[in-house]
Image (tube, rainbow, N blue to C red):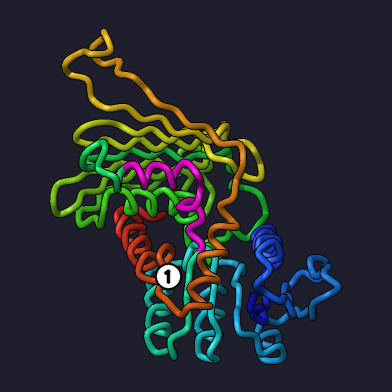
Amino acid sequence: MRKFKTVIIGMGRMGRTRYDAMMRHGGFEITGICDNDAQRLVLESAGRYEDWKSCIDREQPEVVVVCAVNAVIPQVVCYALERGCHVFAEKPPGRCLEDALGMREAFRKCGGQVLKFGFNHRYHYAVIEAKSLIDSGFLGEVVAARGVYGKAGNLERQEWRNDISIAGGGILLDQGIHMLDLLRYFVGDFTVVEGFTDNLVWKEAQGEDTAFVTLKTDNGKVATMHSSAIQWKHKFDLDITCTNGYIALNGLLTSTQSYGEERIAYYKKDLEVKSGKLGNPTEYNMCFDADRSWDFEIEEFYDAVTCMRPVINGTVDDAVAVMELIERVYGNSHI
């Protein structure tokens, strides 16, 4: 296996998660790590830096993994692309649409490197099963979807996510972006975007604690989403309505184990009441007890770098498209 010389910019929780996944994969040699908090630079086997430019310049890596705060992500991505590096960057792709467009422009000017963004939810087992089921045509065509993604967020805590100058937004940009990406993934590109954000509990917070969004495609497919930092009990639900059936994704396996069991249920419409009860068709369920999403995501990135083929999930166009949706919602009611 070819090993690519790699540096990681940002060694917080996500930086460490990506490091662990790359170590399990085996195709990456981590020669440098960077964080402005020296206490996070604990890996003895890699060069340690507190300045990301110095890390890239001195290590001269082939791959740069960007797990920095939102305000810094675009700077690092563009700098790394200009120096011929392949780049894997965390979501969100910056603080605003302008940041995402800047990274796309840098990518288009570069010499054929790979740029991938970490829309990790696409790699969860339940999501993979749902996409396979939809692509098979077994349940017909998707016509609508409804997503709820919420957590207990403390917007008064002193951390970078609660500083709008660094984060760029509140719960919609921080967590709701994952659900918006999944809605695009399953339903399609949305041209009609309506919604609003608000502070229903954390009145003095810089970023919103609530977002409601309604979306529609050119061919009439509809999706709705509720993104919340005041759910209090962590929740992930995604319902997908098809012409001949229905899919429900409930729960999500995460490191906190707080979103419950990850499962998918689906059933075909039963208007002839073969099951014996109208509205109660035979239901099929799958439950998952392992999260391999981080490994699947890194594996796809490695394959794209090795074979120099286009990224499938988490492309720069995916990043721009979802940031366009968020920008339009914020344009209606951003605080």
The reply to whether residue 195 is visible in this rendering is yes
Q: Is residue 58 magenta?
A: no
Residue on which the image places disc 1 = 311
Task: Give the SS element for disc 1.
Answer: loop
Front one among 52 and 245: 245
Q: Quadrant of residue 323?
A: bottom left
Percent across and percent down for residue 264 are: 44, 33
Vertical placement of residue 191 versus 143, above or below: below
Looking at the rendered image, the quarter that the N terminus falls into is bottom right
Q: Residue at x 52, y 69 (%)?
A: 301
The reply to whether residue 207 is visible in this rendering is no
Prevailing secondary structure class for the magenta stretch in the rendered image: helix
Q: Residue at x 61, y 67 (%)?
A: 67
Percent across and percent down for residue 308 are: 46, 80
Q: Quadrant of residue 222?
A: top left
Vertical placement of residue 298 versus 204, above or below: below
Front one among 190 and 160: 190
Q: Residue at x 29, y 54 (%)?
A: 332
Range shown magenta: 118-133
Q: Residues within 10 Å of mark 1 (few under 14, many from 20)?
A: some
The kind of residue on which mark 1 rests is Val
Looking at the rendered image, the quarter that the C terminus falls into is bottom left
Q: Residue furthest front?
A: 1
Percent across and percent down for residue 232 are: 56, 33
Is 146 left, or right, of 29 in this rendering?
left
